[in-house]
Image (cartoon, rainbow, N blue to C red):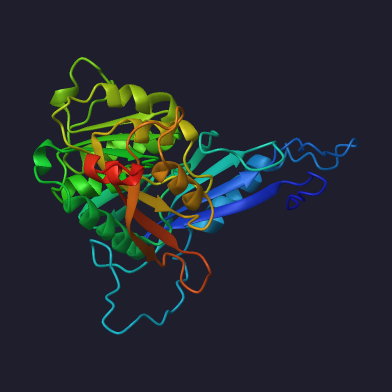
């Protein structure tokens, strides 16, 4: 069965994704492939139709992947680094789950594209800080767990600075993924309630499980009538479609902080508009994987003078902290903290005496 050629859209095996945890010693393999009958560029004579051999080849491949312990390379860790072993003390890593994913498109499948579970567990577990997280095949999770702990520690510190009454403070986690940032903040006791929003439904399903796994009640029905009884609520939707309505339901006396962790495309304009408009948000922590691109664009919209499109007192940048999540590359994450301008500051900003 030939590898897929993206130039002519012909072949079978497109890619193998390997997600591995050095802490839980689990490994998930996702095999992305073209339809067995042939992809978009299938030959007219049917010579690249693998329908008759696909099931046997699938079974053979799963057997190869799961029969033995995986070879783990020796690494030069810094002095004092402690390698994480499994709860049972074993350092072996085996493939614990295998998925196949058929895709006929020309690019790459989205996070909601269906997968076929063929072996082992239906998810990967990872430990990060005080929390344990479930990760489904289509859900985003930071690739560098130890780096993510440093990153989340910075976010926790920035929020802790402004939460005078943590139990009453509500955190909006925009682009929340599997709920890692928000649940970490809850576990650290710096906020009392959490609302997470993400466009990827698999990630939100994981976030709901993760809330329960880490001991937090969550609103499974997204009920608008009983919002005060839950600790967490996760919504599968583009943030720009639900954020404004969610903000309206917050009691005026409730302290609110927000964290945004968008993809490289940055924030939708409607999300920026909602963040600007709702002046009860006094602090905004922006986590960016594209600090020289969309972070610069979004920061300008968050901090610019009010307009009809972007009303409300502007934010001001107060701290920027890079985090090297990708060692030996030119990429880094940036945590930029924004505070809302006070009425007095804004008056001076406008030139009022």
Q: Residue 293's spot in the image, x, y percent?
A: 54, 53
206 vs 316: above or below = above
Image x and y of residue 149, in percent: 29, 61
> Residue farthest to the front?
353
Q: Is residue 282 left or right of residue 261?
A: left
Across and down, in percent, residue 129 comes to 24, 58
Q: Position of residue 239 (x, y in %)?
A: 42, 31
The answer, for residue 123, to whether it is visible in the render is: yes
Q: Quadrant of residue 347?
A: top left
Please indicate whether residue 19 sits to the left or right of residue 151 in the image.
right
Q: Quadrant of the rendered structure where residue 145 is?
A: bottom left
In the image, taking residue 110 as reference, residue 337 lies left or right, namely left
**Residue closer to the observer: 304 or 285:** 304
Decide if residue 340 is in sight here: no
Q: Nearer the viewer, residue 62 or 136?
A: 136
Q: Nearer the viewer, residue 229 or 209?
A: 229
Residue placed furthest toward the top: 225
Residue visible at 87% across and 39% down? 43
């Amino acid at each position: 069965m030939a590898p897929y050629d993206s130039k002519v859209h012909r072949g079978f095996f497109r890619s193998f994704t390997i997600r591995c945890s050095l802490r839980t010693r689990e490994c998930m393999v996702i095999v992305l492939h073209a339809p067995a009958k042939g992809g978009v560029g299938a030959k007219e004579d049917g010579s690249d139709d693998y329908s008759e051999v696909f099931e046997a080849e699938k079974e053979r491949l799963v057997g190869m992947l799961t029969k033995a312990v995986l070879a783990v390379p020796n690494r030069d860790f810094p002095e004092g680094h402690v390698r994480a072993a499994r709860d049972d003390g074993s350092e072996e890593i085996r493939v614990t789950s295998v998925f196949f994913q058929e895709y006929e498109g020309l690019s790459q499948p989205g996070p909601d594209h269906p997968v076929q579970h063929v072996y082992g567990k239906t998810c990967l577990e990872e430990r990060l800080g005080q929390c344990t997280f479930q990760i489904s095949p289509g859900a985003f999770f930071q690739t560098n767990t130890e780096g993510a702990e440093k990153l989340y520690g910075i976010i926790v510190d920035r929020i802790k600075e402004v939460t005078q009454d943590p139990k009453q403070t509500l955190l909006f986690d925009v682009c929340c993924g599997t709920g890692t940032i928000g649940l970490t903040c809850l576990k650290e006791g710096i906020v009392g309630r959490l609302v997470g929003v993400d466009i990827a439904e698999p990630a939100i399903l994981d976030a709901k499980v993760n809330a329960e796994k880490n001991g937090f009640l969550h609103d499974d029905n997204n009920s608008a009538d009983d919002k005060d009884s839950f600790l967490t609520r996760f919504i599968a939707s583009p943030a720009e479609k639900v954020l404004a309505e969610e903000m309206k339901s917050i009691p005026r006396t409730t302290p609110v902080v927000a964290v945004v962790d968008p993809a490289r495309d940055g924030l939708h304009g409607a999300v920026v508009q909602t963040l600007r408009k709702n002046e009860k948000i006094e602090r905004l922590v922006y986590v960016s994987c594209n600090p020289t691109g969309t972070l610069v664009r979004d920061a300008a919209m968050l901090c610019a003078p009010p307009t009809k499109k972007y009303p409300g007192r502007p934010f001001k940048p107060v701290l920027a902290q890079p985090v090297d999540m990708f060692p030996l590359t030119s990429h880094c994450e940036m945590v930029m903290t924004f505070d809302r301008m006070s009425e007095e500051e804004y008056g001076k900003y406008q030139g009022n005496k």
